[in-house]
Structure formats: structure tokens, C-alpha cells
């Protein structure tokens, strides 16, 4: 999916209706979304779990979760890495660090309705 530049979908339905997009790199896997610049969607869960597991969102600059009932999340654990070197704006996206995951948040400028 290296050619994708945006992830966008509507949550269509009631709060908590179960529409969630999962992007997971597990046990050394790679999810290459390096061309995605924006995520404007309902709930999206990004997980990098395990040594050398990588979710590459290296072009992402803005992520807005527009689902009024739930929040999106980035979770890194057990040596997993999510690459977000250009991410500046987060809205309703939680960051979860479990164990020794890798997530550089130094580029963040705006962070609203989000938790660590």
C-alpha cells in the first residue's frame, strides 16, 4: 500500500458500533503506509508488537479521529516501532507504550483529546 496517500472512512452508525480499522505489524512484520499523509477517519488502531515489527507512517502529518464515541490509538510494544517523524497534529488518538516499543513523538505540535 505504499501508493496510498490518505486513509479516510466514515464510522457509519451508532457510537460503539464496532467499525475499527486495525493496522498491525506483528512478530517482525512490516506495514508500509509510508505515502499516507493524512488519516481522517473513525477509529483506527495501529499496533507494532514484537522485535523488528514496523508500521511505517513516515509521511503522516495529521491524524483526526472523527468518531464521537471512541478514540484511535498507536501502540508500540516488545521492540515494535511506529514511524511518525512528520506527524504534527493529533485529535482523539491515544499513544500507548507497552514495554520497550519505539515511538518518536518529537514532531508533535498539536495534541487534543488524546492520552498517553
Image: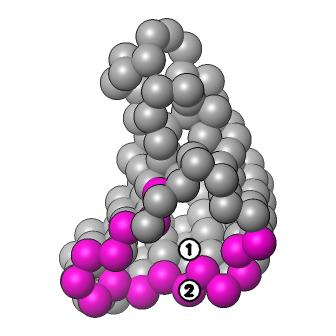
Whether 69 is among the magenta residues is no
Where residue 51 appears, as percent x and y from the top left, is: 26, 88
Which residue occupies 77% across, 72% down? 109
Q: Secondary structure at mark 1?
A: strand
Position of the C terminus by quadrant? bottom left
> Disc 1 marks which residue?
56
Label 1 neighbour load within 10 Å: few <14, some 14-19, many 20+: many
Query: Which of 98 and 23 lies nearest the eye of the viewer?
Result: 98
Q: Quadrant of residue 78?
A: bottom left
Which residue occupies 45% across, 10% down? 14
Start and end of the magenta stretch?
94-109
Q: Nearer the viewer, mark 2 or mark 1?
A: 2
Q: Tell me, for residue 104, which label it has, or none.
A: 2
From the viewer's perspective, tell me whether residue 56 is left or right of residue 58. Answer: left
Q: Whole-Å distance between the Cαs marked 2 and 1?
A: 12 Å
Query: Which of 10 and 107 lies nearest the eye of the viewer?
Result: 107
Image vertical order of residue 64 relative to residue 85, above or below: above
Q: Quadrant of residue 81?
A: bottom left
Where residue 9 appears, as percent x and y from the top left, is: 63, 30
Where residue 21 appears, as percent x and y from the top left, is: 44, 40
Q: State whether residue 29 appears in this view.
A: no
Q: Tell me, for residue 99, which label it has, or none.
A: none
Which residue occupies 47% across, 27% down? 69
Amino acid at each position: 500500500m505504499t501508493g496510498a496517500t490518505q486513509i479516510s472512512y466514515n464510522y457509519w452508525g451508532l457510537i460503539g458500533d464496532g467499525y475499527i480499522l486495525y493496522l498491525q505489524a506483528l512478530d517482525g512484520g512490516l506495514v508500509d503506509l509510508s505515502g499516507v499523509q493524512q488519516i481522517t477517519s473513525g477509529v483506527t488502531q495501529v499496533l507494532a508488537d514484537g522485535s523488528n515489527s514496523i508500521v511505517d507512517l513516515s509521511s503522516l502529518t495529521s491524524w483526526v479521529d472523527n468518531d464521537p464515541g471512541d478514540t484511535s490509538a498507536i501502540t508500540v510494544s516488545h521492540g515494535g516501532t511506529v514511524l511518525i517523524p512528520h506527524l504534527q497534529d493529533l485529535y482523539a488518538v491515544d499513544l500507548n507504550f507497552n514495554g520497550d516499543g519505539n515511538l518518536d513523538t518529537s514532531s508533535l505540535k498539536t495534541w487534543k483529546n488524546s492520552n498517553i
